Image (tube, rainbow, N blue to C red):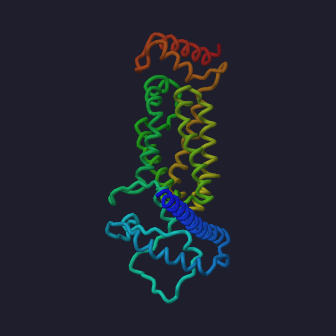
Amino acid sequence: FLRSGRNNLKMNQQLVVLLFLVFLAHESASFRITSSARIVGARGTNHDVPASLTSTTNSRLTRINTTCHHPLKPSTSNPLHSLKIKLTTAKFAKPNKSTKTNTDQPNYDTPKLLQSLLVPTLSLSLPPYIPKYLPLSLLHILGGTTGTPIVLRATKSWYKRISLPPWIPPNSIFGPVWTTLYGLMGYSLHRISPPAAAAATIAQKAAIKAWSLHYLLNLSWAPFFFGFQCLRTGLVINLLLLTSLALAVLPLFHSIDPLAAYAQLPYLAWLVYATVLNREICRLNPMVGGVNEAMVQADLCAGGGGEAGEYNEAMLEYDLKKLQKAAARYAGL
């Protein structure tokens, strides 16, 4: 009994060693296949792959391609509905001319498919009856309304007490004009922007950056002019807006899409008018001791409770002093 047990133990040990050797041989063959595939993928050639390994790889690819189909119904519109796994070793496998390729099922490239799954593109799907430029136009209009509370507060208080040119339009005109101009800005930006699935060109990147800086400068005018009563700082901002639009933004837009540049011409004309108007307001309200008339009137309105536009005692005293000075100048005193 002991002798037979020792014999069985020796046989079991020999069997284990034999199975281990078979496993090592199988793993060595798999390692050589993987190494050859990496070399071929890096060099773009297939001269390093033995013929025996190529035939073995072809047989393995055939088994994998026939067993790794997605169970859902195939669809050419969505790659997820017909997903076929391909090994990267197919790059170096020699095609068999005797076998006829099956063209009924779509053949997807694995790297491109993974890129489409892992890196989705950001696109806004809109109904067909809504213009594609509408989101950008609404975004520009919404940005323009950030200075509306400041403008309304100023036009109801100190702005109507300073000296203004007689050819200035009524305040009710500025709202519709700027709304239209901001809408055209969004339309122009939409025309020069790349599609959702395409990368921006160098010219498009330069145009978008130039327009972003110009738009931020445009939004800064209302806080400086109406918020801080810095009339001359507002004039400098208008000059910068006019120069950057004429010399940078419009040429870049025209090089990409001429219609995008033509849509900005009403904005250019309005900037010319606004710059001339701002200059005239600065001339009529000069600086005296580092303070202009707008700052004085703003202080009178704030100190006397005239934020809502009511006339207070501080305003009355100030107006009497102005009349006395004007009468003295007229009389030559």
Q: Quadrant of residue 101?
A: bottom left
Please provide percent x and percent y for residue 168.
49, 37
Q: Quadrant of residue 272?
A: top right
Please provide percent x and percent y for residue 255.
60, 62
Residue at 52% of width from left, 25% of height from top? 162
| Residue found at the far bottom of this picture | 98
Query: Is 309 on the left or on the right of 252, as rendered?
Result: left
Residue at 57% of width from left, 63% of height from top? 17
Q: How many marks?
A: 0
Q: Quadrant of the C terminus?
A: top right
Residue 111 versus residue 141 in the image, above or below: below
Q: Do we see residue 258 in this rendering?
A: no
Please provide percent x and percent y for residue 55.
55, 80
Residue 21 versus residue 251 in the image, above or below: below
Query: Is 55 on the left or on the right of 74, as rendered?
Result: right
**Which of these two is toward me, 155 or 94?**
94
Query: Is 32 on the left or on the right of 66, as rendered?
Result: right
Residue 8 versus residue 55 in the image, above or below: above
Please provide percent x and percent y for residue 230.
59, 28
Q: Do we see residue 3 in this rendering?
A: yes
Q: Quadrant of residue 170?
A: top left
**Which of these two is toward me, 223 or 99?**
99
**Which of these two is toward me, 80 or 39?**
39
